[in-house]
Structures are given as C-alpha cells and as structure tokens.
Image: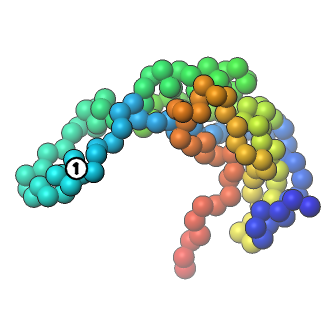
C-alpha cells in the first residue's frame, strides 16, 4: 500500500479530472549580491526608493524564452496555457490529470489522511533537460492543504 505520511492511498485519480498547475520559472537576472543587500539595509527607510511594479517586473521577471519553452512543453503534452506572466514568473497550465501525469512523469493517486482526502503524487517530478535550468517549481500536482486553520 502506498502512503504519504499518515495518509493512505485510495486509488488512482480519475484520468479525466480537470487540474490547474502553476510552473514558476527563474528570474532573468540574479538577485542582489550580499554587498548590495547590506547597502540597502543600511539606507534609512526615509531615503529608500522602490521601483514600480512594471520596473520591478522588467528587472526581475522571467525571460520570455523560458515562458515560451514551458508553454511549448505544455502544448506538446495536450495541456492548455491559461496564463503566462513574466512579472510573476509563472505559467498557469490547465488540463486532464492523465496529461499532467504523463507530462511530469508522476503517478497521481487519491489519498485519505487526517486532514481529509486529496490528490497526491508518487515519483519524482521530471522535466525535459531543456526546462530543468529554467523551472524553479511545479505547484498543484498535489492538492493537499498546505496550512491548517487555527481555531
């Protein structure tokens, strides 16, 4: 029997189940160096300047080529592109569970755990070599709650 911590597998996910997955890609420019961060931190708050959202996106957003590579990968696997945003460095994909499982090389199972039922993966998420340097995260293959409400 397959388990996820205290959860146990109920069986495979319906291959037709609709899913939405977010792929986060790297910034086209590395972040500030330690010296630059130190200089920023030593500047009094009143003297600091901040870029607009647009300027920040231009400086730290995704390279359009990385977004296009993820979009092409998605289309090759029968997935739709719901959104592609360079400023947020994200591509939001939609499609069927079977297509996501095939695209990312995972098995999707239903699990039951203390927090309820959820979709989870077995196997390591796989990406083609040309995407590996660009992709930082694949979010949404697993839909278990990430936080617990406090009462």
* For residue 100, side relative to residue 28 (left or right): right
Horizontal side, residue 105 vs residue 134: left or right: right
Residue located at (48% from left, 20% from top): 65
Quadrant location of the C terminus in the rendered image? bottom right
Q: Residue furthest right?
A: 1
Q: In the rendered view of the protein, which quadrant contains the N terminus?
A: bottom right
The percent position of residue 132, horizontal first and vertical second, equals 59, 33
- Residue underneath mark 1: 35
Q: Is residue 87 visible?
A: no
In this picture, is 147 found above or below 95?
Answer: below
In this orientation, which residue lies closer to the viewer: 58 or 124?
124
Comparing 148 with 60, the one in front is: 60
Q: In the displayed structure, does residue 49 sit left or right of residue 55? A: left
Residue 33 place in picture, x, y as percent: 28, 46
Above or below for 115 versus 60? below
Res 27 quadrant in image: top left
Residue drawn at x 81%, y 44% as measured from the top left: 107
Quadrant in the picture for residue 64: top left
Q: How many C-alpha atoms fall within 10 Å of the one at disc 1: few (<14), some, or many (≥20)?
A: few
- Residue at screen point 68% across, 58% down: 144
Whether residue 142 can be seen here: yes
């Amino acid at each position: 029997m397959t388990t996820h911590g205290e959860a146990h597998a109920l069986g495979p996910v319906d291959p037709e189940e609709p899913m939405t997955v977010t792929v986060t890609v790297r910034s086209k420019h590395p972040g500030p160096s330690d010296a630059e961060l130190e200089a920023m931190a030593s500047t009094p708050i009143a003297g600091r300047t901040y870029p607009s959202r647009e300027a920040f996106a231009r400086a730290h957003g995704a390279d359009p080529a990385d977004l296009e590579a993820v979009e092409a990968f998605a289309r090759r696997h029968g997935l739709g592109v719901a959104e592609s945003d360079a400023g947020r460095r994200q591509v939001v994909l939609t499609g069927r569970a079977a297509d996501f499982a095939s695209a990312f090389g995972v098995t999707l199972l239903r699990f039951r755990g203390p927090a309820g039922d959820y979709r989870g993966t077995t196997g390591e998420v796989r990406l083609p070599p040309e995407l590996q340097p660009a992709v930082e995260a694949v979010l949404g293959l697993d839909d278990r709650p990430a936080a617990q409400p406090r009462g």
